[in-house]
Every structure is written in structure tokens, then in C-alpha cells.
């Protein structure tokens, strides 16, 4: 999701700052860079990093839940910065016989709000995105959710497209190939197949699966 198909950091930061101020921390501001630096981590870890000014426990959890719930509402209306040729590339991949799925470490509802904002349905073989899974649904780490989605859809082979080291590590642990979205938020500490634009998947995917 983030750093691969869109960049929602600006609007996430705005929505979180609003809730932080509503909670009484009026001297605190969540910035776009703050959000970009924690993209890809689970929400509990993000809260520990960004809300260190709160007491760990109920106080921090309450602020986290408030922010992540409002974030979904805000993004459903305002969206984020969509990278070029996302939908066109998904369609071309499907026309070539591939299947598109989304796995993320996000909270429940985040993937759905992305799809709803752009008017996309999901869940059937006719949809651009056939299935989704995330940490917020089941509290499973990304490697486990990659395997879960692959098993659920009876995939015999697959590759994961991501932009940060954690994506690569999870994909290796899950036992699948990886393609680095080099235009995203992070770097990978080993040489891997990569794309500089999302549309390059058309030529790179056949080389890895």
C-alpha cells in the first residue's frame, strides 16, 4: 500500500494531528515525515514511536484508536497521492493472467477505504483486486498474512511488491519472490529485482514468477 501504490502520509498526518489536539496535546504536531518514517510498521509500534509523550497503556491506546479510526474516515473522503498507472497496470497484469492482491500491516479498514475512495470493488475474480488481508484483521505479522492469503487463494507461486526492508524480510520468510518499489519510502539491503515506476511491473513480474 504505502510507498507502493500511494502516499497517504500528508493526509494521515493531518488527521492524526487533529485528534492529538482534540485529546489535549495541543503543542504536538504529527508531520508527514513522522508518518513516512513509520510506514509499514504495525499500529501499536507506530503509537509507541509517535506518541512517546503519552503514558504507555490505556492513555496511549485510546489516542491510537482515535487516530486510526479517524484516519480511515478522512482518507475515505480525501484519499492520498496515487502513484502513476496503478489501475492501468493492475488491469494489464490481469489481462496477462496474473491475479492482484493487497497485504498490509495497516489497521482494519485501511485497504477498504483506499479502494472505496477510488470506487473499486474487490473480492471476486472480475475485480482488479481479488483479495486483501492486513494486520488489523487478525494481528498476524506480514509474513503470516502473505502465506494466509496465498493459501486462501490456492496460489502455487507469487511475488510481493513492496518498498521497505520489512516487506522484503516478510516475503522471504513467507517463501515468495520480491520486487522492490524503488520509488517508495525505503531501501533494501540486498540486490533484488526492482521497479522505478509501477508500470514496469508488466515487464518485471514475468522474470520472477
Image (cartoon, rainbow, N blue to C red):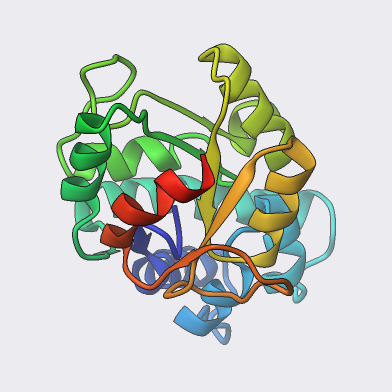
66 lies above or below 149 = below
- The residue at the far right in this view is 56
Residue 141 seen anywhere in this rendered image of the structure: no
Tell which of 207 and 32 is nearer to you.
207
Q: Residue at x 54, y 65 (%)?
A: 163
* Image-quadrant location for residue 142: top right
* Image-quadrant location for residue 102: top left
- The residue at the far bottom in this view is 27
209 lies above or below 194 = above
Numbered label tally:
0
Q: Position of residue 154 (x, y in %)?
A: 55, 12
Please indicate whether residue 207 sits to the left or right of residue 53 in the image: left
Tell which of 24 and 86 is nearer to you.
86
Please indicate whether residue 205 sits to the left or right of residue 46 in the image: left
Please indicate whether residue 6 sits to the left or right of residue 51 in the image: left
Tell which of 17 and 23 is nearer to you.
17
186 lies above or below 97 = below
Q: Residue at x 75, y 54 (%)?
A: 169
Please indicate whether residue 195 sits to the left or right of residue 65 in the image: left
Q: Position of residue 160 (x, y in %)?
A: 54, 45
Q: Position of residue 55 (x, y in %)?
A: 83, 65
Q: Position of residue 10 (x, y in %)?
A: 37, 74
Residue 175 seen anywhere in this rendered image of the structure: yes
Q: Residue at x 52, y 78 (%)?
A: 30
Amino acid at each position: 500500500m504505502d510507498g507502493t501504490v500511494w502516499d497517504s502520509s500528508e493526509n494521515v498526518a493531518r488527521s492524526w494531528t487533529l485528534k492529538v489536539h482534540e485529546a489535549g496535546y495541543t503543542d504536538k504536531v504529527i508531520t508527514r515525515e513522522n508518518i513516512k518514517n513509520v510506514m509499514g510498521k504495525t499500529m501499536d509500534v507506530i503509537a509507541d514511536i509517535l506518541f512517546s509523550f503519552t503514558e504507555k497503556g490505556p492513555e496511549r491506546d485510546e489516542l491510537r484508536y482515535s487516530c486510526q479510526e479517524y484516519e480511515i474516515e478522512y482518507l475515505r473522503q480525501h484519499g492520498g497521492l496515487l502513484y502513476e498507472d496503478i489501475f492501468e497496470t493492475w488491469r494489464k497484469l490481469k489481462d496477462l493472467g496474473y491475479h492482484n492482491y493487497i497485504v498490509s500491516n495497516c489497521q482494519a479498514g485501511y485497504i477498504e477505504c483506499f479502494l472505496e475512495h477510488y470506487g473499486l470493488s474487490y473480492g471476486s475474480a472480475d475485480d482488479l483486486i481479488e483479495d486483501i488481508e492486513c494486520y488489523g484483521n487478525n494481528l498476524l505479522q506480514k509474513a503470516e498474512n502473505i502465506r494466509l492469503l496465498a493459501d486462501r487463494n490456492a496460489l502455487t507461486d507469487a511475488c510481493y511488491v513492496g518498498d521497505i526492508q520489512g516487506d522484503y524480510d516478510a516475503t522471504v520468510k513467507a517463501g515468495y519472490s520480491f520486487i522492490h518499489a524503488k520509488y517508495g519510502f525505503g531501501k533494501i539491503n540486498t540486490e533484488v529485482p526492482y521497479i522505478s515506476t509501477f508500470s514496469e511491473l508488466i515487464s518485471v513480474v514475468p522474470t520472477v514468477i
